[in-house]
Image (cartoon, rainbow, N blue to C red):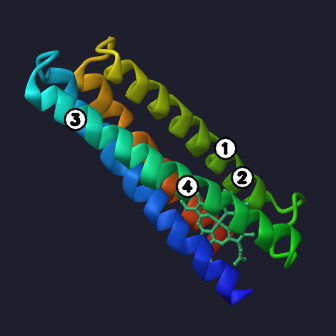
């Protein structure tokens, strides 16, 4: 079980690193001139971060997390802390999908959102992470 938990935490660190960094890249990308070398470099950085790191890390986080639940009965859907954590994880996964959509829009030079928008969006994964970690470690409910 501790091996699976370690793999769970390792994959979450990789996923979260991307979830915190990708919107930050977009803050700068939104202000870069379309077609400029800088904008093209951001496109490559965003695509690689998403495809090579974030998506595999998200899948691994889910696999190891669900393994802890169903393989080792570490949590139950009747535990309030777990329901709150699970809701946080669903929102985080939704945010991942939203960012993947933004990467596609940037790749087509069709981004409509401002740097300020991405700066605000950048806070969402941080907030969700705080809630999720408190739920799973403190288990206050
Ligand atoms: C993807 C779906 C996920 C599922 C099904 C899941 C499920 C679980 C379960 C059952 C445990 C063991 C609980 C315990 O030790 O009592 C656990 C541990 C943990 N999870 Fe997740 N998790 C998921 C995603 C996440 C995410 C996104 C984060 C952080 C942002 C996270 C952070 C942690 C941490 C830090 C631990 C270790 C807690 C401890 O050992 O005290 N998990 N997870």
Residue beneath disc 4? 56
Q: Secondary structure at mark 3?
A: helix
Rendering quarter of residue 62? bottom right
Q: Tell me: is circle 2 under 8 Å from ligand 1.
A: yes
> What whole-number distance in Å separates the C-alpha atoms at marks 3 and 1?
27 Å
Compared with 104, 92 (above or below) is below
Residue beneath disc 2? 86
Residue count near mark 3 (Cα–Cα under 10 Å), binned few <14, some 14–19, many ≥20:
many
What x and y, as percent, mark residue 98?
A: 51, 29
Along the polypeptide, which appears first: circle 1 or circle 4? 4
At x 31%, y 16%, the residue is: 113
Q: Which of the pair 123/5 is nearer the observer? A: 5
What x and y, as percent, mark residue 56?
A: 55, 55
Residue beneath disc 3? 42
> What whole-number distance in Å separates the C-alpha atoms at marks 4 and 3?
20 Å
Taking the image as shown, residue 16 lies to the left or right of residue 94, namely left
Q: Secondary structure at mark 1?
A: helix
Compared with 1, 77 (above or below) is above
Decide if residue 120 is in sight here.
Answer: yes
Tell me which image quadrant ligand 1 sits in.
Answer: bottom right
Rendering quarter of residue 136? bottom right
Residue beneath disc 1? 90
Marks 2/1 in contact by CB < 8 Å: the verdict is yes
Along the polypeptide, which appears first: circle 4 or circle 3? 3
At x 22%, y 35%, the residue is: 42
């Amino acid at each position: 079980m501790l091996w699976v938990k370690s793999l769970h935490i390792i994959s979450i660190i990789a996923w979260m690193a991307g979830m915190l960094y990708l919107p930050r890249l977009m803050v700068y990308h939104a202000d870069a001139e379309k077609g400029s070398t800088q904008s093209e470099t951001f496109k490559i950085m965003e695509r690689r971060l998403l495809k090579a790191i974030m998506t595999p890390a998200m899948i691994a986080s889910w696999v190891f997390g669900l393994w802890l639940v169903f393989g080792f009965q570490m949590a139950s859907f009747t535990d309030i802390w777990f329901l709150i954590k699970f809701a946080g994880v669903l929102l985080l996964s939704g945010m991942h999908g939203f960012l993947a959509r933004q990467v596609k829009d940037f790749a087509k030079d069709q981004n409509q959102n401002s740097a300020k928008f991405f700066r605000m969006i950048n806070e969402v994964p941080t907030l969700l992470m705080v809630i999720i970690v408190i739920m799973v470690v403190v288990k206050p409910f």
